[in-house]
Amino acid sequence: MINGKNRALLFGILVALTMLAHAGINVGDLETCALSGDRGAQRTLAESYYVGNGVEKNYAQAARWFLLLAQHGDTRSQTSMGLMYARGWGVAKNYAEARKWWRLAAIKNDPGAQYNLALMASNGWGVEQNDAEALKWYIKAAENGHVLAQNNLGLIYREGWGTPPDQVAAYMWTAIAAEQGDEKAQETRKHFEATLDPRALNTAQQRVHDWLQKHLK
C-alpha cells in the first residue's frame, strides 16, 4: 500500500546521527573509555563506524556499540539496532529482532521506531500484513511529528486502509506533512483543495491550524 518512493526510504529515518566535526578519531582511547562504560564514547564509536566518519565505515562495529547502548535502554540505539537487523547491516538479517528493538523504542515514543513498525505491518515484512496494526503505529508516529508517517496517514484515510475513509482526516495529515516541507504532500494538498467540499475543507484546515499551533510552536 505504500508507494515505491516510500519503500525505497523504507526504514527511512535511522536516527539523527551526530556528525563529528574533526577529520579523525582516536579509536584506541575511545574504545578504552567505551569498554569502561562511557556512554558518550560508545555512541561516538557506533555513529562513527556507521557513517564512516573519522574511521572506515564498518557496520559490524557500529552494530557492536549500538547493541551495547540498546541493551542499556538507549532509545535511539534501540531504533538503530532495529534498522541494522532489518537491513542485515553488521548482523544477520532478522525481522523478529528488528521488531523487538523497534517495539522497545516505540513504547518510549520514538517516532522513527513507530514509523518502522507501521511499515512492517503495512507491507508484511516479517509479520502478517495488518492494516489496522499499521494504522495504530502511523497515528503514533504522526502525532510525534514524523513527516513520512503523516503523509502516509493522509493516504490511508483517503483510501480507507484499515479504517473507514475520512477525507477531512486525509487532508489534515497531508497538509501537516506539506507544512513541514514534504513535496509530495504539497502536491496532494492542492488536489484536495480543488476537490474537497468547502465545508469539509474549512473543518480540515482548522484542524491543521490547531495541530500546528500545538506541536510546532
Image: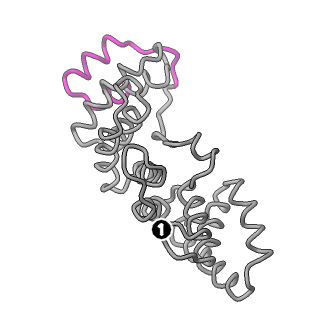
Picture quadrant where residue 175 is located: bottom right
Looking at the picture, how far across and down is residue 115, in whole percent?
Answer: 46, 52
Task: Give the dominant element type of the magenta stretch: helix, strand or loop.
Answer: helix
As for residue 82 lying within the magenta part, the answer is: no
Could you say which is closer to the camera, residue 41 or residue 59? 59
Residue 211 vertical placement versus 10 (above, below): below
As for residue 33 lying within the magenta part, the answer is: yes
Q: Residue at x 47, y 13 (%)?
A: 56
> Where is the C terminus found, in terms of image quarters?
bottom right
Is 84 placed left or right of 100 in the picture? right
Q: Secondary structure at mark 1?
A: loop
Furthest residue to the left? 36
Could you say which is closer to the camera, residue 20 or residue 102? 102
Q: Residue at x 40, y 28 (%)?
A: 88
Looking at the picture, how far across and down is residue 193, in whole percent?
Answer: 76, 74
Looking at the picture, how far across and down is residue 188, in whole percent?
Answer: 72, 63
Segment tinted magenta in the rendering: 21-45
